[in-house]
């Protein structure tokens, strides 16, 4: 039976994380709208493509890679009351985060044009995208290091400071977008270049806010000297845990891109309906992500304290909240799908197809919640390999082959594709739940043995 104290702790961790995701989604939407209003489809395409490339690489190697590894080790060390050990893991995680961020940022800057050409950009989209990527590559360095710092804060149970940092980044980004894209307050209208400058400045300010917090609050008593010291053994431990998490993100992102390419084969109506339905569904991801963060932190701390029943309870509470909220979204997808579609487009054909996609999406919401939360619990407990294996199977052995069959062989429409993703998430959610229980039981037996 879960106590009120445990429920409160989960909510205190999860809700700021959900708020953080909402803030970043707002800036993404508004940035796209302002760029589109200034420069039209070429500007939107350039910023959209360049951003997709930059943030995909950032997520694979740092945000969902090194950050996951350091979160797990710091959380477990804190749970075991080994604060000096937590400090060493945190300092080494920051060192690796800075190194990884510098490499990715440098490659984005030096190879911007080649990467965009490889992605299919040409003409004006290539020219604008190159300008955006070169400038934004500077900002993404600070963003990735900030993500590593935020991961450590979450491992200590602090999700409010990352949310505050996100609010600062978002407000500043939107304000600077308005000034620099359109040329307000005496500044020249810079369009895409202005958007990149705004994003970069916002990321730099957000980084320095989090750094200031570390210094003022003396988080884990970390010093600059600690961060600059390289410890081979600790670095290898973090990297070993980070690699499966990075590969999981890579497997998901690449399969998603291939899925989009296949759906484009179905025509513009199907593609537009799918993109809008996916955008609407992405709102429901946020509770799942927030409670997954809470599950990662608390499962890690409980496993570190060898309180395995506590790890089960905290993860179950997180899953219950995520499934309940995302289940409510299922009801909206079932009852008012056309109303949701009309908020994005007026085309009756696209609305009709997209509404059917959303109705099918209602099936997968509870399973998606379970997959995200119990996957987070597994990572917190120190097992990143199982989530990677499960996600790889669901993406590459279920989703892509079945999508190929329904699109190219059976020649069914995009709605059938959403039935495939519902099947994929049903497998992933069930598998994450079963393997989380298995992992905790294995840890229990190891202690008894």
Image: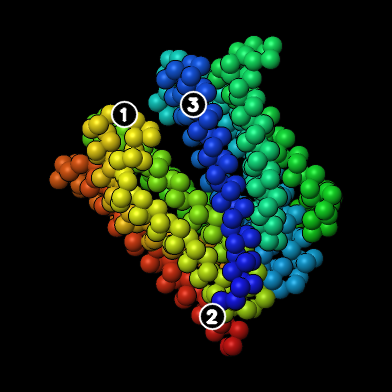
Whichever of labels 3 and 2 marks the residue nearer the N terminus, that label is 2
Q: Which residue is mark 3?
A: 33
Mark 3 vs 1, N-terminal side: 3
Q: Is residue 354 found left or right of 29 in the rendered image?
A: left
Q: Position of residue 278 (x, y in %)?
A: 38, 42
Mark 3 element type: helix
- Disc 2 designates what residue? 1
Q: Residue 312: where, in percent of width, then height?
A: 53, 75
Give the quarter of the figure containing the N terminus: bottom right
- Disc 3 to disc 1, C-alpha distance: 17 Å
Marks 2 and 1: in contact by CB < 8 Å?
no
Q: Nearer the viewer, mark 3 or mark 1?
A: 1
> Which residue occupies 82% across, 53% down?
217
* Residue at the spot 20% in from the left edge and 41% down from the top edge: 413
Give the Cα distance between marks 3 and 2.
Answer: 47 Å
Q: Quadrant of residue 306?
A: bottom right
Q: Residue at x 44, y 62 (%)?
A: 324
Would you say residue 215 is visible in this rendering? yes
Q: Secondary structure at mark 2?
A: loop
The image quadrant of residue 193 is: top right
Mark 3 packing: few (<14 Cα in 10 Å), some, or many (20+)? Answer: few
- From the image, tell me which residue sits under label 1: 346
Structure colour scheme: rainbow
Q: Residue at x 41, y 40 (%)?
A: 279
First along the sequence among labels 1 and 2 = 2
Q: Residues within 10 Å of mark 1 (few under 14, many from 20)?
A: few
Above or below for 11 versus 268? below
Q: Nearer the viewer, residue 62 or 156?
A: 156
Q: Could you tell me if residue 72 is visible in this image?
A: no
């Amino acid at each position: 039976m879960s106590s009120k104290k445990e429920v409160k702790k989960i909510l205190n961790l999860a809700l700021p994380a959900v708020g953080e995701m909402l803030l970043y989604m707002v800036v993404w939407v508004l940035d796209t709208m302002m760029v589109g209003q200034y420069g039209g489809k070429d500007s939107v395409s350039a910023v959209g493509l360049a951003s997709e490339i930059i943030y995909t690489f950032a997520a694979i190697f740092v945000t969902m890679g090194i950050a996951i590894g350091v979160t797990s080790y710091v959380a477990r060390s804190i749970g075991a009351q080994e604060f000096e050990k937590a400090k060493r893991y945190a300092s080494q995680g920051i060192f690796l985060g800075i190194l990884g961020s510098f490499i990715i940022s440098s490659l984005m800057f030096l190879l911007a044009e080649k990467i965009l050409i490889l992605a299919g950009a040409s003409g004006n989209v290539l020219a604008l995208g190159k300008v955006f990527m070169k400038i934004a590559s500077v900002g993404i360095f600070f963003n990735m290091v900030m993500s590593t710092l935020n991961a450590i804060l979450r491992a200590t149970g602090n999700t409010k400071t990352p949310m505050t940092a996100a609010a600062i980044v978002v407000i500043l980004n939107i304000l600077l977008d308005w000034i620099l894209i359109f040329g307000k307050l005496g500044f020249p209208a810079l369009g895409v270049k202005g958007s990149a400058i705004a994003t970069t400045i916002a990321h730099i300010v957000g980084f320095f806010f989090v750094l200031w917090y570390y210094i003022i609050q003396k988080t884990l008593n970390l010093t600059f000297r600690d961060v600059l010291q390289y410890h081979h053994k600790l670095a290898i431990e973090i990297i070993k845990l980070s690699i499966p998490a990075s590969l999981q993100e890579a497997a998901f992102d690449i399969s998603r891109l291939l899925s989009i390419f296949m759906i484009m084969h179905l025509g513009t109506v199907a593609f537009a309906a799918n993109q809008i339905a996916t955008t609407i569904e992405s709102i429901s991801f946020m509770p799942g992500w927030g409670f997954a963060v809470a599950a990662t932190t608390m499962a890690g701390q409980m496993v570190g304290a060898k309180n395995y029943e506590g790890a089960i309870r905290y993860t179950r509470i997180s899953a219950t909240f995520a499934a309940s909220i995302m289940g409510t979204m299922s009801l909206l997808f079932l009852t008012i799908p056309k109303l949701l579609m009309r908020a994005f487009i007026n085309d009756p054909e696209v609305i009709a197809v997209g509404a059917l996609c959303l109705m099918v999406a209602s099936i997968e919401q509870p399973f998606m919640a379970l997959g995200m939360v119990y996957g987070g619990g597994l990572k917190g407990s120190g097992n990143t390999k199982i989530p990677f294996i499960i996600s790889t199977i669901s993406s590459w052995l279920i989703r892509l082959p079945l999508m190929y069959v329904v699109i190219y062989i059976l020649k069914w429409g995009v709605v059938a594709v959403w039935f495939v993703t519902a099947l994929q998430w049903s497998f992933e959610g069930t598998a994450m739940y079963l393997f989380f229980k298995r992992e905790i039981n294995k840890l229990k037996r190891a202690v008894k043995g």
